[in-house]
Image: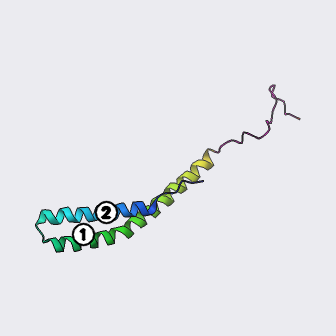
Amino acid sequence: MFREIPISSIAACFGMAAFAIAIISGLGAGQPADAILWRAILCAAICYPVGIIVALIGSAAVNEEFRAHQERHPVPDLDAPLSTDLDGAPSA
């Protein structure tokens, strides 16, 4: 019933963002290319599992809130018989 949150996509975004930030900051600092690439790969490898953890926590929080919202605001059963007639008397 709940919409699946793309955990691996979120983790990949974390890893690619870390890679890009490491490349840009290494170029800005004037580091040699081999050092920049190794550090960028290391940052991506570290941030991917961090992204998985963040996505799992976010997914659990969203699913818990969605479940609580459904309990507070249930969807009425439209196929259920009416409990009263138009004049307010219980139906037979």
Q: Is residue 47 left or right of residue 69?
A: left
The magenta region covers: 74-91
Q: Amino acid at mark 2?
A: Met
Q: Is residue 67 left or right of residue 9?
A: right
Q: How many marks?
A: 2
The tag on residue 18 is none
SS at circle 2: helix
The C terminus appears in which quarter of the rendering? Answer: top right
Q: Which residue is mark 2?
A: 16
In the displayed image of the protein, which residue is found farthest to the left?
30
Q: Quadrant of residue 77?
A: top right
Instruction: Indicate the position of residue 57 as horizontal and vertical percent values.
Output: 46, 62
The tag on residue 40 is 1
Please determine whether, in this image, residue 28 is positioned above or below residue 45: above
At 42% from the left edge and 67% from the top edge, which residue is drawn?
53
Q: Does the magenta stretch mainly form a helix, a strand or a loop?
A: loop
Q: Is residue 1 left or right of residue 49?
A: right
